[in-house]
Amino acid sequence: MPHRAQFLCGFLLSGSDPCVDLTPSLHCASMTDGEEDSGACLALTTVGTDEDAAATARVLVESRLAACVTTTGPVTSVFRWEGKVSSEQERLLLIKTSRDRLEELESRLNEIHPYDVPEFLVFDVRGGLPDYLAWLHANTRTAPADGDSTSP
């Protein structure tokens, strides 16, 4: 089991197809010329247990810092910590949010995360179904609006 002092590895998803080439950014970089800005971001983090994954996801969605958190795993992370290469089973959280909530999301995740140095990687979302993106933005506003409880 991973413990609080571990720093867990991050990764970059990439490929030759521009639809799957995700550019990492600490602050969800703006679009390049000619691309439409969805205003949405995907953030990644890992935790060691199903319980930590469920608790983290619930806090982020209840506080409207994420519209949805998808948990996958267990996954295996291989990383270097304190001079040693380690391998641990973890749960990967895919956090769907809007750009204007990133700073608060990062701060809250640091407060509640069980690791001393949590993984927090952010990817710009270049596009998506308009209805899903509208739902994402509605459910990450600080004040609820009519219809926010509707599923994507």
Image: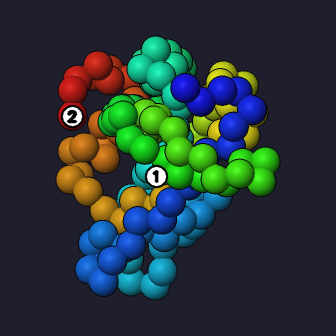
* Front residue of 40 and 60: 60
**Residues tagged 2 and 1 counted as in contact (Cβ below 8 A):** no
Neighbours of disc 2 within 10 Å: few (<14), some (14-19), many (20+): few
* Front residue of 84 and 114: 84
Badge 2 or badge 1: first in the primary sequence: 1
- Residue occupying image coordinates x 69% and y 37%: 6
* Front residue of 88 and 57: 88
Secondary structure type for disc 1: strand
* Front residue of 39 and 44: 44
The C terminus is located in which quarter?
top left
Residue denoted by label 2: 152
- Colouring chosen for the image of the structure: rainbow
- Residue occupying image coordinates x 48% and y 65%: 12
Residue denoted by label 1: 41
- From this viewpoint, is residue 143 visible? no
Neighbours of disc 1 within 10 Å: few (<14), some (14-19), many (20+): many
Q: Across the whole image, how many numbered discs are drawn on residues?
A: 2
At label 2, the amino acid type is Pro
- From this viewpoint, is residue 41 visible? yes
User: In the rendered view, would you say 124 is above or below 17?
Assistant: above
x, y percentage for residue 50? 42, 20
Of all residues, the one furthest to the right in this rendering is 82
> Image check: 108 left or right of 57?
right
Residue 147 circle label: none
- Residue occupying image coordinates x 46% and y 15%: 51
- Residue occupying image coordinates x 53% and y 31%: 47
At label 1, the amino acid type is Cys
x, y percentage for residue 37? 42, 65
Measured Cα–Cα span from mark 2 to mark 1: 16 Å
x, y percentage for residue 85? 64, 53
Secondary structure type for disc 2: loop
